[in-house]
Amino acid sequence: MSLLKQIEKDIKKTIENLGYEIDKTSLTISNRKDLGQFQCNDAFVLAKNYNKPSRDIALEISDNLSKNANYENVNIAGAGFINISLSDSFLTSYMRELEIDLNKEINKHEKKKIIIDYGGANVAKALHVGHLRAANIGEALKRLSKTLGYEMIGDTHLGDQGRQSGMCILEIKQRYPDLPYFDLNFKGEYPSISPVTGEELESIYPIANKKAKESEEYLEEVRKITGELQNGNKGYEALWNHIKDTSIKEIRKIYDELNTDFELWEGETDSYPYIPEMLELFKEKNLIYESDGAIIMDVKEDSDEKEIPPLILKTSKEAYTYQTTDLATIYGRMKRFNPNGIWYVVDIRQSLHFNQVFRAAKKSGMIPADFDIQHYGFGTMNDKDGKPLKTRDGGNMRLIDLLDLVKKETYKRLNPSITDEKEKKEIANTLAVSAIKYADLIPNRTTDYVFDFTKFSDLEGKTAPYLIYSTIRMKSLLNKALNESIGPITKINNDTDRDVLLMLLELGLTLEKSFQAKSLNEITDYIYKLTNTYNKFYSENKILINEDNEQKASWLGLTKLVYNTNLKLLDILGIKVPEKM
C-alpha cells in the first residue's frame, strides 16, 4: 500500500475516532508548499453532513493529527483546508522500505482478466503511421494494467478479411491466371510457398485499390471474390493464407522493433467458425431480419438523441461485414477466455461502429449488461500543417519510413566517443523508437497532436532522449560507487533532497490516475518532473566526494530509488534504455 493510502487511512481513523462517519478521505498533493506538503478537504464534506462549521471540524481533525509523530506542521487555511507535512524521520523510514521493494508504492487492484485489442494491422497493406498510436497506447495500457494486478491478454486482431482480401486475390488472379488457386477442378495439394513476395504485396493492394475506384466492373468482381472467400472457396483460402503469412512476417518485425508484443496473433477470419452459431442465437431471440437480401439487426434505443443505424450482418452479396466479425470475435472470446472485460484501443473515429457492436452484444446476451467492454479511442498524429502525416504524394506515410526519419535524427545526436558503427546504429534505433513512443504518449489519449521529428529527438526538454540520458547518468553514478555503501536513505540534507523524496510518493497516485483515465500522459508528465527534480538535486550536490559517509550513502540510495522508478515507468511506456548514448 502506498504511503498516501496509509495517510488517508490514518485520517479516516482519526475522523471516526472523533465520532464522524466518512466514506473515503481525500488527500491531495498541495500546490502551496509554504503551507504543507499535502492537503485534506474532508472537513467540508463533514460540515455539510453534520451541519457544523467546516473550520471547527478541521480544528478537531488537525489537533488530533498533530499528536501523531509522523506528521508535523499540521495547520488550517481558510474555511477548513487541512495542510499536512511529513516528519523527515517518517519520510526516510518509508523510503527505506521502498529501497527494498518499490512495488510497495503501487496500489494493486482486484485481479481481473481483460482482453485488450490494440493492433488492427491490415495484412493487405504496409503498416502506416495510423497504426502507431494503437500499438503504443495499447501496449502501455496493457503493461500498466499488469503492473496494477490485472491479467491482460493482448490481441493484434489483424484485418485479414473484407474487401482488401478480394482486391489482392483478384489482382494476383489477373497477373497469374494459371495458378491452381483459381482452378475450380483442382484436386491436389496447393503449393506450400507463396506465389508472391512481400515486396510484390506492397504494390499489389495499392494497384488493386486504384482499379476498384476506377472500374465498377472490377469492384463487383472484388465483391464476388470476397463473398466466395468468406463462404469457403478452398483455392482462395489457400492463396489468402499465403498472403497473410507473408505479410504477418513483415508486420511482426515492425511491432518487435516498437517493443510491442501480443499474446494473440488472431484476425477477423478467426471469428468465422463462430458466425453460424452466433447468427443462430440472434435468430432464436428474434433480433435479426432480412431486408433487400441483407441480414439486419436494429440496435437503436428509445433514449437516443440521434439516429443509430442498424447493423448489417450479411450483405446481399453473401459477404460478412466488420460488424459481424467483431461480434463473432466477442462471441469467441467469451467462450474461450471467459474474460471480465474487453478493451479496444482504436481510432476515435470508429466510435459509432463500436457503439453499435457493443449494443448488439449486450442486447443478444453474449455479454452481461455490466460487462467491462470499452472503446478507448485516440486522436491522430499530425504533421506541422495540423493534418495526418502523409507522404509527399499524399499517401499514408509508412511506419517504417517514419522510423527511418527519426533514426537519422537520433544518430546525429549520439556521443562522438561511440565509434563502433554497429553499436552506434543500434543505440540510434533504440532512441528513435523511444522518441516516437514517448512523444506519442505525451498528449492525452483523445487529443490530436503534431509530431516534430527534430523536437522529439532532442536531448533537452520533454523528450525520451532527455529521460534516457538522465537515467543512464544515474546508472553511471551508481556504477562508480560500487565500492561505496548505497543506502539506506537516512538523512535529508535540504529542501532539494526532500523534494525528490516527496516526488517519489506520487508514483502510486500517478499510476492510478493514468489507469482511471486510460491515458499515459499522467505517467509521461510524472517521469519528466521526477527526472527534472532529481537533476536539480544532482547539480547541487557533489555526491561521490562528500566526506560524510552517511550522507553519501543516503544520496546514493536516493539515486538508486529514482533510477529504479524511472526504469519501471519507462518499461510501462514500452521504452528501452540502452547502456550508453
Image (cartoon, helix red, strand yellow):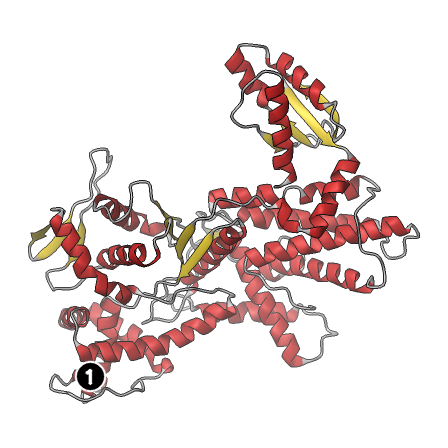
Percent across and percent down for residue 68 are 73, 26
Quadrant hosting residue 209: bottom left
Percent across and percent down for residue 538 are 79, 52
The correct choice, above or below, for 400 with respect to 157 in the image is: below
Give the residue drawn at x 50%, y 45%: 515
Q: Is residue 532 visible?
A: no
Percent across and percent down for residue 157 are 35, 63
Residue furthest out toward the right: 547
Give the residue drawn at x 20%, y 82%: 173
Give the residue drawn at x 57%, y 70%: 407
Side of 317 where 49 appears, left or right: right
Residue furthest out toward the left: 292
Side of 68 where 252 appears, left or right: left
Quadrant hosting residue 108: top right
Task: Give, as a three-letter code, the residue at label 1.
Answer: Tyr
Element type at mark 1? helix
Determine which residue is flagged by label 1.
181
Q: Is residue 417 visible?
A: yes
The correct choice, above or below, for 166 with respect to 287 in the image is: below
Quadrant hosting residue 211: bottom left
Side of 486 where 281 appears, left or right: left
- What quarter of the picture does the C terminus occupy? bottom right
Front residue (pair 101, 420): 101
Give the residue drawn at x 16%, y 45%: 298
Percent across and percent down for residue 350 are 32, 52
